[in-house]
Image: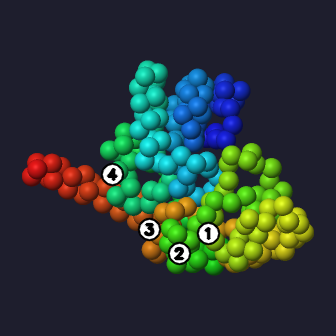
């Protein structure tokens, strides 16, 4: 799965390894490049997503990517990502033209997730208003990300102290940040989740999360069908 750069130079190597070429995109220009690369799966990632991303919203990016694929004559699968954590989001993504979804934040709350317990508890307790996009988490870790890709994280003491002060001596905080991250401190290290954090509610087995999402999506689509018939 490739993202945040040109996939074309890597496409032949991926295919030679017998793997499917999955390209995550944040803009239509990136989607066009993924099509040029022969991507078998294109993930249209909206800015609601946790982790690194850009500025487009999921609900407009997904149908535009679907339309672009149709015009290009590719049979690549289109997946929606960003802000999707339950059956309502899955049903909405399907109606927008996606073939499925890629989810992250809801699985951050899975029992199997390799997440420090304190970070997981802080995510479960948060709502979508508690996240923001920033660059300070990358700066303190000496990660040289392109300016157009910020990272969405949970607001906490570290983020509130440094966000908007990117030109300050943030590098001096690197040792303390690394220690906090190693200790799983949810106040002084990054909790990397998206706006869908307000929809997760509790820690559950991954199979329960997925099965509930699919069942709820089916119910939502059935409800929509009934509303259309009634109308």
Mark before the other along the chain sequence, 1 or 4: 4
In the depicted structure, whether residue 28 falls above or below residue 83: above
Question: Split into 4 quadrants, where in the image is the N terminus?
Answer: top right
Disc 3 and disc 2: Cα gap in Å?
Answer: 9 Å
Residue 136 in view here: yes
Query: Mark number for residue 154?
Result: 1
Mark before the other along the chain sequence, 3 or 2: 2
CB under 8 Å between discs 2 and 1: yes
SS of the residue under disc 3: helix
Mark before the other along the chain sequence, 3 or 1: 1
> Residue at (52%, 41%) from the top-left corner?
43
In the picture of the structure, the residue carrying the numbered disc 4 is 91
In the picture of the structure, the residue carrying the numbered disc 2 is 126
Q: Position of residue 161 (x, y in %)?
A: 75, 74
User: Could you tell whether 179 is left or right of 200 in the image?
Assistant: right
User: Could you tell whether 7 is left or right of 194 in the image?
Assistant: right
Disc 2 and disc 4: Cα gap in Å?
Answer: 24 Å
Mark before the other along the chain sequence, 4 or 3: 4
CB under 8 Å between discs 1 and 4: no
Q: Position of residue 42 (x, y in %)?
A: 52, 36
């Amino acid at each position: 799965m490739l993202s945040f750069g040109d996939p074309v130079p890597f496409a032949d190597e991926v295919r030679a390894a017998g793997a499917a070429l999955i390209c995550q995109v944040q803009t239509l220009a990136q989607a066009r490049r993924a099509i040029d690369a022969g991507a078998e799966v294109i993930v249209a990632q909206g800015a609601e997503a946790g982790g690194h991303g850009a500025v487009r919203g999921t609900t407009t990016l997904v149908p535009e990517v679907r339309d672009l694929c149709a015009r290009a004559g590719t049979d690549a699968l289109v997946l929606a990502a960003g802000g999707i954590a339950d059956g309502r989001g899955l049903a909405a993504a399907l109606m927008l033209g996606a073939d499925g979804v890629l989810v992250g934040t809801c699985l951050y709350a899975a029992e199997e997730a390799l997440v420090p317990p304190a970070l997981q508890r802080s995510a479960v307790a948060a709502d979508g208003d508690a996240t923001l996009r920033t660059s300070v988490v990358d700066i303190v870790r000496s990660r040289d990300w392109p300016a157009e890709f910020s990272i969405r994280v949970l607001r906490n003491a570290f983020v509130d102290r440094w966000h908007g002060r990117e030109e300050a001596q943030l590098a001096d905080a690197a040792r303390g940040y690394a220690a906090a991250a190693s200790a799983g401190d949810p106040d002084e290290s990054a909790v990397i989740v998206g706006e869908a954090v307000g929809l997760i509610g509790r820690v559950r087995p991954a199979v329960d999360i997925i099965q509930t999402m699919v069942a709820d999506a089916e119910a939502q689509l059935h409800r929509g069908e009934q509303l259309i018939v009634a109308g």
